Image: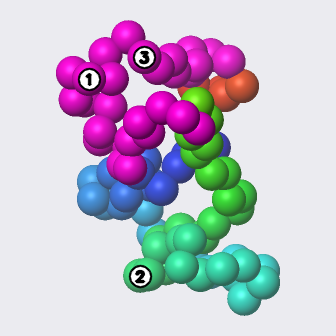
């Protein structure tokens, strides 16, 4: 399925219509679109695992700092996802 970033992209391209599924009141509305263009179907957190004694980033963008070069790995999108 799509994630929130992809839903927002196709919403901006005006490819979605407003829709409220019958189960909309059973899920956390903050995870969907505030204007009603999409609703959450799963909550899939990203996990950061590291050495507790090492300097850890406080934000995902910290990985762009050269001090983290060669010190982390990211799984291939073909592993555990449907994205190719």
Q: Residue at x 25, y 29 (%)?
A: 64
**C-alpha distance separating marks 3 and 2:** 40 Å
Classify mark 1: helix, strand or loop: helix
Q: Residue at x 42, y 16 (%)?
A: 71
Residue positioned most to the top:
70
In this figure, which residue is indicated by the disc labeled 1? 67
- Contact between labelled residues 3 and 1, with CB atoms less than 8 Å apart: yes
* Residue bounds of the magenta highlight: 52-79
Taking the image as shown, residue 48 lies to the left or right of residue 18, namely right
* Front in this rendered view, residue 82 or 44: 44
Q: Estimate how packed mark 3 is, as few (under 14), some (14 to 19) or many (20 or more) residues with alpha carbons within 10 Å.
A: few
Q: Residue 35: which numbered mark, if any?
A: 2
Q: Estimate how packed mark 1 is, as few (under 14), some (14 to 19) or many (20 or more) residues with alpha carbons within 10 Å.
A: few
Classify mark 3: helix, strand or loop: loop
Note whether 38 is above or below 50 in the view shown: below
Q: Residue 29: where, in percent of width, then height?
A: 59, 81
Residue 75, quarter of picture: top right
- Contact between labelled residues 2 and 3, with CB atoms less than 8 Å apart: no
Q: Residue 71: which numbered mark, if any?
A: 3
Q: Residue at x 53, y 49 (%)?
A: 3
Q: Say which quadrant the N terminus sits in.
A: top right
Taking the image as shown, residue 20 lies to the left or right of residue 41, namely left
The label nearer to you, 2 versus 1, is: 1
N-terminal label among 3 and 2: 2
Q: Say which quadrant the C terminus sits in.
A: top right
Q: Residue 7: where, in percent of width, then height?
A: 45, 55
**C-alpha distance separating marks 2 and 1:** 40 Å
Residue positioned most to the front:
53
N-terminal label among 2 and 1: 2
């Amino acid at each position: 399925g799509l994630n929130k970033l992809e839903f927002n992209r196709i919403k901006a391209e005006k490819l979605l219509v407003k829709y409220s599924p019958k189960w909309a009141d059973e899920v956390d509305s903050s995870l969907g679109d505030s204007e009603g263009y999409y609703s959450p179907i799963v909550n899939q957190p990203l996990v950061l695992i590291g050495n507790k004694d090492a300097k850890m980033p406080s934000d995902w963008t910290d990985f762009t700092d050269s001090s983290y070069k060669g010190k982390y790995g990211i799984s291939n999108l073909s592993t555990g996802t449907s994205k190719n």
